Image: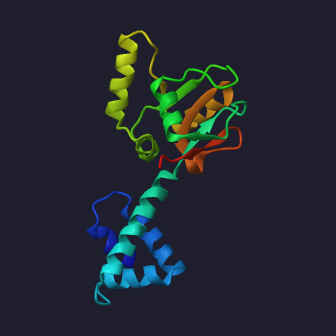
Amino acid sequence: MLIDILSANLLRKDAKQRIRQLIFFAILCPAVAGSLRALLGFRPLRTKHISIAVFCLCTCTRLAFAQVAVIAHKAVPVDTLSQTQLFDFYSGEVKSWSNKVRAVVFDLKPAGEAKEAFYKLLGKTPSRMKSIWLKKMLMGEGDPPEALPSEEEVLKKVAATPGAIGFVSKAKATPEVRMIVIVEKK
């Protein structure tokens, strides 16, 4: 009930998930619980409550990024990439891995939560990435990543293609592929 009341006031489509996370933080941290009670009108609102609530909402936003898994073929020689390195693969700047195996990049065709979270992680919009790929194509420097119709297809293709990299929802990642840890820019 509380989740429904709170999420009705928020305009984001993932509001229920954010509220659940905020309530989870409230259980773990008494200061967050005080902020949550103050924001709901159960106590007078103080400056510290606003700052703690803002911190929690920012943390929840970062947790949304964690819902996408960057995956690669098992033979790929890395376990971590920075956001910049990931962008370089997806923009076509980097065309091979450190072991000289050609990088094969896969994208998702339909718009969805995984694609939205991934592009937020890259720090680019899908339209901006399209313009980058179009420019590369016109200059003869490469083609855009192959866009696949579903996350299941991305999983199959990445598992079967040496040097492949792609992304899926974290819940759909399987042991047949390597999950790459993305280190955020500071």
Depicted 54 relative to depicted 2: above or below: above
- Position of 41 with respect to 179 (left or right) is left
- Position of 25 with respect to 130 (left or right) is right
Percent position (x, y) of residue 149?
Answer: 48, 31
How many numbered discs sit on the rendered protein? 0
Coloring scheme of the render? rainbow
Depicted 97 relative to depicted 2: above or below: above
- Give me the residue at 41% from left, 65% from top: 18
Q: Is residue 149 visible?
A: no
Q: Is residue 88 visible?
A: yes
Residue 57, quarter of picture: bottom left
Task: Classify the position of the N terminus by image quarter.
Answer: bottom left
- Give me the residue at 49% from left, 36% from top: 84
- Give me the residue at 69% from left, 31% from top: 76
- Position of 11 with respect to 156 (left or right) is left
Percent position (x, y) of residue 78?
Answer: 67, 36
Depicted 142 relative to depicted 81: above or below: above
Outermost residue to the front: 186
Percent position (x, y) of residue 36?
Answer: 38, 80
Outermost residue to the top: 140
Percent position (x, y) of residue 181?
Answer: 61, 45
- Give me the residue at 52% from left, 53% from top: 66
